Image (tube, rainbow, N blue to C red):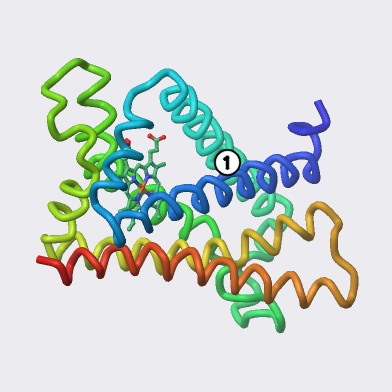
Amino acid sequence: MWLSNSSIGRKVVMSVTGIALILFLTFHLSMNLVAIFSESAYNMICEFLGANWYAVVGTICLAALAVIHIIYAFWLTIQNRAARGSDRYAVTARPEGVEWASKNMLVLGIIIALGLILHLFNFWYNMMFQELVGNDTTLAANGAYWIKETFHNPVYVILYVIWLVALWFHLTHGFWSAIQTFGWNNKIWMKRWEVISKVYTTILIAGFLAVIFAFVACR
Ligand code: HEM
């Protein structure tokens, strides 16, 4: 099939899944920002999502998107390296205009995946998973409690900041690169999309950092 047989098809899959994951992050941040203003409103949202069938279907779709994105990332990287052969080591200077992030997308992606495992352990495991397996659910919908519990620990604060910085680099390049793949770029719009992807990503990451530091400060 075109989406898996050709290099451009594989880039389209990376781009579509990447943009879908950015949309999830936008939704996730909107939900988390509520916690800064009202813990009880945030807990109501967590309870509404809980382990209901629609939340579980959402989680499965999200996991599928992430798995496809990661598999295709490795696939494209291996293919690119094979195409370049030993030339990969011939030039050490960065070509002009090629950002640092674009050359390190796989490494950044691996840091993000490791951070995500930690994050799911901190939150999803204590919340949705406990409800799914029928354990004591008194704290399962108390998202605000888990945010306080996590960011009370300075080690987690540092790890989350590193994770979010890696995410900033990954998304600024990924967003722009996806637009290129879709062909929505001409001379004027190429620069504009670069600015839009930087501004949008900065808003997302600043929002997540605001949630973390609002709760660090409240202890
Ligand atoms: C301040 C930062 C963040 C906070 C406070 C936060 C909070 C949470 C909470 C409370 C949950 C559990 C929801 C539930 O199971 O009902 C959750 C799940 C999740 N978070 Fe975050 N999150 C943050 C940042 C992020 C970031 C940056 C990412 C992605 C890179 C992310 C990805 C996820 C995913 C994939 C889930 C599982 C979603 C699901 O079960 O459908 N989170 N987060």
Residue nearest the viewer, comparing 191 with 4: 191
Identify residue for label 1.
69
Residue 42 percent coordinates (x, y): 31, 47
Residue nearest the viewer, comparing 143 with 169: 143
Residue 84 percent coordinates (x, y): 71, 58
Check disc 1 and report its element: helix, strand or loop. Answer: helix
Q: Residue at x 31, y 63 (%)?
A: 211
Q: Residue at x 75, y 44 (%)?
A: 12
Residue 6 percent coordinates (x, y): 81, 38
Quadrant in which the C terminus appears? bottom left
As drawn, 151 above or below 25: below
Question: Mark 1 is on which residue type?
Answer: His
As drawn, 210 above or below 178: below
Residue 36 percent coordinates (x, y): 30, 61
Position of residue 51 in the picture relative to residue 154 (left or right): right
Residue 87, quarter of picture: bottom right
Q: Residue at x 15, y 67 (%)?
A: 218
Q: Residue at x 56, y 69 (%)?
A: 101
